[in-house]
Amino acid sequence: MINELSVTGMHCKACKALIESEISELDGVTTINVDLADSKAKVEYDEQKIQLQSLIDKITELGYQAALK
């Protein structure tokens, strides 16, 4: 499954790197690409291992706001 999320609260490349690093470590996530300029993240994941809401919750735990685009 591939979804695009709207991610707000990012201010710099470190924000982008943190989200990509933390989300990519989750079991079931294949790839994540965060676009800082457009405030979005494209995530490819296995629905059998992780749910979209878990990805959104993790991004929120990191201090950002995320929602399905």
Image (spheres, rainbow, N blue to C red):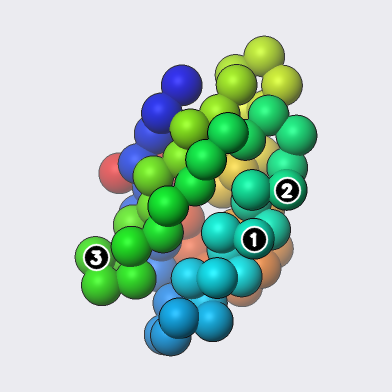
Question: Where's the C terminus, which quadrant?
Answer: top left
Which secondary structure lies at badge 3?
A: loop
Mark 3, residue position:
38
Could you tell me how far apart the alpha carbons at marks 3 and 2 are, in whole angstroms?
A: 23 Å
Label whose residue precedes the other's in the sequence (3 or 2)? 2
Residue 40, placed above or below residue 45:
below
Percent from the top left, x then y, of residue 64? Answer: 53, 69
**Rendered view: 52 above or below 17:** above
- Where residue 49 sits, quadrant-wise, is top right
Q: Residue at x 42, y 52 (%)?
A: 33
Q: Which residue is mark 2?
A: 25
Label of residue 21 in the image:
1
Name the residue type under label 2: Glu
Would you say residue 14 is visible in this rendering? yes
CB atoms of marks 2 and 1 within 8 Å: yes
In this view of the protein, which residue sits in the foreground, 19 or 63? 19
Q: Earlier in the sequence, mark 1 or mark 3?
A: 1
Q: What residue is shown at x 52% (from left), y 40% (from top)?
A: 31
Residue 50 x, y percent position in the rendering: 68, 28
**SS under mark 2:** loop
- Residue 12: give x, y in percent of width and height: 43, 85
Neighbours of disc 1 within 10 Å: few (<14), some (14-19), many (20+): few
